[in-house]
Image: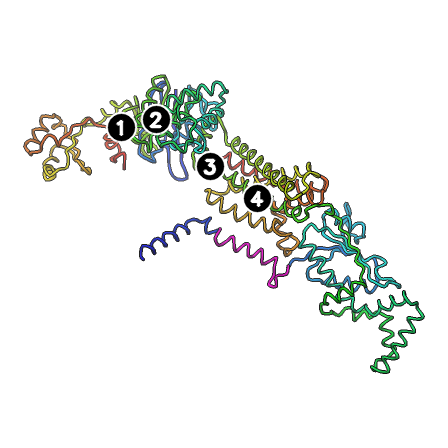
């Protein structure tokens, strides 16, 4: 028994001395739990707010009330104004601008309450809904929240809308007669004042509309659906043959790219351990040449890896990788450059290969989770969305979405590509200086 | 040919080399002997331009070697202490990779590969993966890589560490052949037997300082006692050590006593007569010439293996 005890103690001591193993065993799960916990709250529903444009061109009491309800929706952040190019003052969104914002991927959806949203003769509320289902979860949240907000208010309008429908079918006079007769019956038998009843059919009580109604059953919703005209238009990705994979392939690609390229970059440690690095440095080869050769090799590996992955997705799942091939190539190269630089950064700050592996695994997993490889960043709390923008994963995932999902032109990916290349340039310059001065190896 | 001028190197607060100067002539087999941590490898690293000295210069044919001096590295072959090979590749692939980095053309490289493989006796194993080689074979290939570009100077940093006696002898033979063909060799070791066997001239380094240098004979002549007498530890000799002490300075080792006789007892006849009176049979006595170990002990008060 003592032998077993001693052997167990031996393993514990070895484990505690292996800092990367400790890091991976305890810190990584904790960090991931924080990330998952921030996305999915206690009830399992998303915590983050999804941005959505609201254009209210109607300016009726009903539209104003619905606008106020959407403003206070838990899962939506209503955006009503935008800053035009070269403009100082923000302007109210118009339907055209809103559509352009959705089409170019600046926002996922826009709801328009048009001028004829609810006119004097409307028998139904008319909405226009423009969306880009670049992410399934996000689309579900938007549509669900919209439906919930609108449907909880519509029942208050039912008598009024029914009256309008009746007028359409049987005319004004007959409808007024029917209402008066029905009011009389109600007053006689149910002690309900006839005037009050008639008023409920012909006038909207806006104070009632502001009161929340419990969730409606689906059957009721179906009935209410007749009073709501929802003109939905998917602006992006209609022709995409495999939307699910097309949306997510970029996120997974950059994550695996980071793992493989960081591994390749940190192979300098292996060369050091094997003694071959020193032999190279004793030959007519200088440190910068070694670093550059490693960079070029690793980057080429990354580019080939991504193209193999994309061609595989095309062959077996029909992901369209050829329609926007030049731009896809640009994003692949920029992403690979940034990923290799990340590996170089790890190599230049770590002191051993174990340390490099521990740090890189932690950072890659966190970057993948926060940067949008696993979930759309729009589901994150605001503070996490801010963090996501400092990860290279975010810029790469967004760029892949632009070229694969949106089939965007080169101009649309310029900011992403510039950020990825700037990251690559700065990190490489830092690693090169450290390596050249012999501070790394 | 290779001049090391007042080299100093410090790592943090540790003085690795202190005012080291050596002058190695063309075609010489020069040994640098010292215990582990004496500064031998640091000096090698500075000579090949892997490390920068704090002070001092190194010249090859009167040309100063600068840090990362790529042209100068073509004149020097370096055999590292560790096996510095791509183990997952074949011997031939290793030689191709390293040969190309030395700038050798295809035909020249092929002929050099054949030549060095023959020298290290690995021609029939050139297609085999290095990881399948024995320790001795890896060491030989390690040497072969350093010879591809036909360097004028060969730096060997303890090239026989962990090698079986047979392979060690093979490496000695190869190095001797190379030296005979005109290669200048700087050979570091902490084995005095290797230095004694191979080197025409040598220096002893300790704590980063060259404490002496010269031919083997020069160094031994520095000693008062040119001979040592070993007396085996047996039942016959154990209780007589006090009497032996009268003959000179006695050091006790695991299996024998080592006697450095006093000047007045340096005649063999005197010593043997004394042993005879003590009833110590002659088969327990061995007279040996003083070695580099004795030189090191004399200069530092420590054994090379301490």
The chain that hosts pointer 3 is: A
Q: Does residue A422 show up?
A: no
Residue tagged 1: B193
Prevailing secondary structure of the magenta residues: helix
Residue B21 point in image, percent of width and height: 36, 26
Same chain check for tags 4 and 3: yes
Up-down: is B185 above or below B306? above
User: Helix, strand, or loop for circle 1?
Assistant: helix
Q: Measure how far apart labels 4 and 3 are at the Cα level.
A: 27 Å
Q: Measure how far apart labels 1 and 2 are at the Cα level.
A: 13 Å
User: Helix, strand, or loop for circle 4?
Assistant: helix
- Within 10 Å of disc 2 (Cα), the crowding (few <14, some 14-19, many 20+) is many
Q: Tell whether position A36 is magenta.
A: yes
Same chain check for tags 4 and 1: no
Q: Tell whether position A129 is magenta.
A: no
Residue tagged 4: A256
Q: Which badge, 1 or 2, is on the more N-terminal residue? A: 2
Residue A221 point in image, percent of width and height: 75, 65
Q: Measure how far apart labels 2 and 3 are at the Cα level.
A: 25 Å
Q: Nearer the viewer, residue A6 or A416?
A: A6
Which residue is at 8% across, 31% downward? B274
Residue numbers of the magenta segment: A24-46
Residue tagged 3: A441
Q: Nearer the viewer, residue B241 or B17?
A: B241
Residue tagged 2: B187
Q: Nearer the viewer, residue B225 or B275?
A: B275
């Amino acid at each position: 028994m003592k032998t077993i005890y001693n052997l167990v103690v031996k393993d514990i001591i070895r484990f505690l001395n292996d800092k990367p193993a400790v890091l991976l065993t305890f810190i990584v799960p904790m960090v991931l739990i924080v990330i998952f916990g921030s996305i999915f709250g206690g009830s399992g529903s998303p915590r983050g707010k999804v941005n959505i444009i609201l254009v209210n061109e109607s300016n009726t009491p009903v539209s104003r009330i619905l606008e106020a309800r959407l403003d206070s929706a838990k899962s939506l952040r209503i955006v009503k104004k935008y800053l035009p190019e070269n403009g100082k003052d923000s302007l109210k969104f118009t339907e055209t601008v809103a559509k352009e914002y959705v089409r170019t991927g600046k926002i996922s959806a826009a709801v328009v309450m048009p001028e004829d949203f609810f006119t004097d003769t409307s028998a139904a509320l008319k909405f226009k809904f423009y969306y880009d289902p670049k992410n399934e979860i996000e689309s579900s949240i938007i549509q669900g929240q919209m439906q919930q907000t609108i449907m909880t208010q519509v029942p208050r309008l039912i008598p009024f809308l029914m009256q309008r429908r009746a007028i359409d079918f049987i005319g004004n006079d007959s409808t007024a007669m029917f209402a008066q007769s029905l009011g009389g019956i109600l007053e006689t038998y149910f002690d309900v004042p006839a005037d009050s009843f008639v008023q409920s059919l012909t006038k909207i009580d806006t104070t009632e509309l502001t009161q929340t109604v419990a969730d409606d059953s689906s059957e009721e919703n179906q009935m209410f659906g007749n009073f709501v005209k929802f003109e939905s238009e998917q602006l992006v990705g209609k022709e995409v043959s495999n939307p699910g994979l097309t949306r997510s392939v970029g996120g997974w690609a950059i994550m695996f790219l980071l793992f493989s390229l960081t591994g390749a970059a940190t192979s300098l440690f292996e060369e050091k351990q094997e003694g071959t690095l020193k032999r190279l440095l004793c030959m007519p080869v200088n440190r910068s040449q070694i670093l550059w050769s490693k960079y070029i090799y690793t980057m080429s590996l990354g580019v080939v890896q991504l193209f193999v992955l994309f061609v595989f997705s095309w062959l077996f799942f029909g992901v369209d990788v050829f329609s926007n091939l030049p731009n896809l190539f640009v994003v692949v190269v920029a992403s690979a450059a940034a990923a290799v630089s990340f590996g170089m950064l790890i190599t230049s700050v770590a002191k051993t290969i174990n340390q490099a592996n521990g740090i890189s695994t932690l950072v890659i997993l966190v970057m993948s989770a926060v940067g949008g490889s696993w979930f759309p960043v729009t589901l994150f709390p605001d503070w996490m969305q801010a963090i996501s923008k400092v990860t290279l994963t975010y810029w790469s995932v967004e760029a892949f979405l632009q070229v694969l999902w949106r089939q965007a032109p080169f101009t649309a990916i310029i900011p992403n590509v510039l950020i990825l290349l700037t990251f690559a340039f700065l990190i490489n310059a830092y690693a090169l200086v450290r390596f050249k001065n012999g501070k790394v190896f | 040919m290779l001049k090391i001028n007042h080299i100093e190197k410090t790592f943090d607060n540790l003085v690795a080399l202190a005012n080291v100067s050596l002058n190695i002539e063309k075609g010489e087999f020069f040994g640098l002997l010292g215990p582990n941590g004496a500064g031998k490898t640091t000096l090698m690293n500075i000579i090949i331009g892997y490390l920068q000295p704090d002070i001092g210069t190194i010249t090859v044919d009167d040309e100063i070697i600068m840090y990362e001096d790529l042209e100068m590295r073509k004149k020097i072959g370096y055999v590292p202490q560790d096996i510095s090979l791509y183990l997952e590749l074949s011997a031939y692939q290793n030689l191709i990779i390293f040969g190309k980095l030395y700038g050798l053309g295809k035909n020249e490289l092929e002929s050099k590969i054949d030549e060095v493989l023959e020298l290290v006796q690995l021609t029939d194993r050139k297609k085999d993966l290095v990881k399948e080689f024995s320790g001795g074979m890896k060491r030989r290939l390690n040497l072969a890589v350093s010879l591809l570009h036909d360097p004028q100077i060969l730096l060997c940093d303890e090239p026989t560490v962990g090698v079986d006696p047979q392979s060690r002898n093979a490496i000695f033979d190869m190095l001797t052949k190379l030296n005979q063909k005109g290669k200048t060799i700087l050979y570091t070791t902490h084995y005095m037997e290797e230095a004694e066997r191979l080197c025409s001239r040598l220096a002893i380094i300790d704590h980063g300082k060259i404490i002496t240098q010269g031919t083997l004979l020069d160094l031994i002549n520095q000693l008062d006692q040119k001979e040592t007498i070993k007396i085996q530890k047996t039942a016959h000799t154990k209780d007589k050590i006090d009497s032996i002490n009268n003959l000179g300075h006695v050091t006790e080792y695991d299996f024998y006593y080592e006697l450095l006789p006093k000047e007045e007892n340096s005649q063999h006849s005197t010593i043997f007569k004394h042993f005879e009176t003590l009833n110590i049979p002659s088969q327990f006595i061995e007279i040996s010439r003083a070695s580099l170990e004795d030189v090191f002990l004399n200069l530092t008060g420590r054994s090379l293996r301490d």
